[in-house]
Amino acid sequence: MHGMGMTRLAALSLVACGCILGTPSPARGQTVVQNIDVHVESEHPVELLGHSESNTRWSSMCRSPCDVPVPLTWTYEVQAEDASSDSQLFWL
């Protein structure tokens, strides 16, 4: 996987915030996926990618700058548009 390297990491701002207030219980057999709002901003264009545990194919969540709700349970990475270096996987 190629993405944002450590040299550019200082230039990336990734902010996640969310709250859960009175979340109703799911009906029997249903799964509730909780989302969190993420803000991505960087000096160079980047893309936030994510995938669920059951589907390891990467999905584009947004391109910087952006604000987007994303599932809390997914795996993420930030990829530079020029794909010049490797990125680290992360979880929220």
Image (cartoon, rainbow, N blue to C red):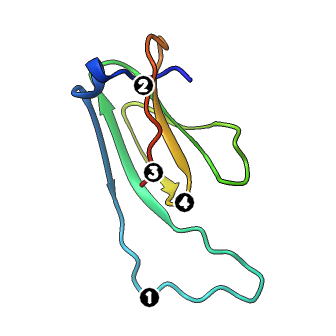
Residue at image mark 4:
73
Rendered position, 17 above or below 7: below
Query: How far apart are labels 4 and 1 at the CA level?
Result: 19 Å
Relative placement, left or right, of 74 versus 88 is: right
Cβ–Cβ below 8 Å for labels 1 and 2? no
Cβ–Cβ below 8 Å for labels 2 and 4? no
The mark that comes first in sequence, 3 or 1, is 1
Quarter of the image that includes the C terminus: bottom left
Amino acid type, callout 4: Thr
Amino acid type, callout 3: Trp
Looking at this view, is 64 or 9 the one in front?
9
Residue at image mark 2:
46
Residue at 69% of width from left, 42% of height from top? 56
Quarter of the image that includes the N terminus: top right
Q: How crowded is mark 3: few (under 14 residues within 10 Å), some or many (20 or more)?
A: few
Amino acid type, callout 2: Val
Residue at image mark 1:
22
Of labels 2 and 4, the one closer to you? 4
Query: How far apart are labels 3 and 1 at the CA level?
Result: 24 Å
Q: Could you say whether the residue bearing mark 4 is in a helix, strand or loop?
A: loop
Q: Could you say whether the residue bearing mark 3 is in a helix, strand or loop?
A: loop
The mark that comes first in sequence, 4 or 1, is 1
Residue at 23% of width from left, 25% of height from top? 11
Q: Where is residue 37 in the image (x, y as percent from the top left)?
A: 40, 56
Q: Where is residue 55 in the image (x, y as percent from the top left)?
A: 73, 48
Of labels 3 and 2, the one closer to you? 3
Looking at the image, which residue sits at the far left?
Answer: 10
Q: Residues within 10 Å of mark 1 (few under 14, many from 20)?
A: few
Q: Where is residue 81 in the image (x, y as percent from the top left)?
A: 47, 17
Residue at image mark 3:
91
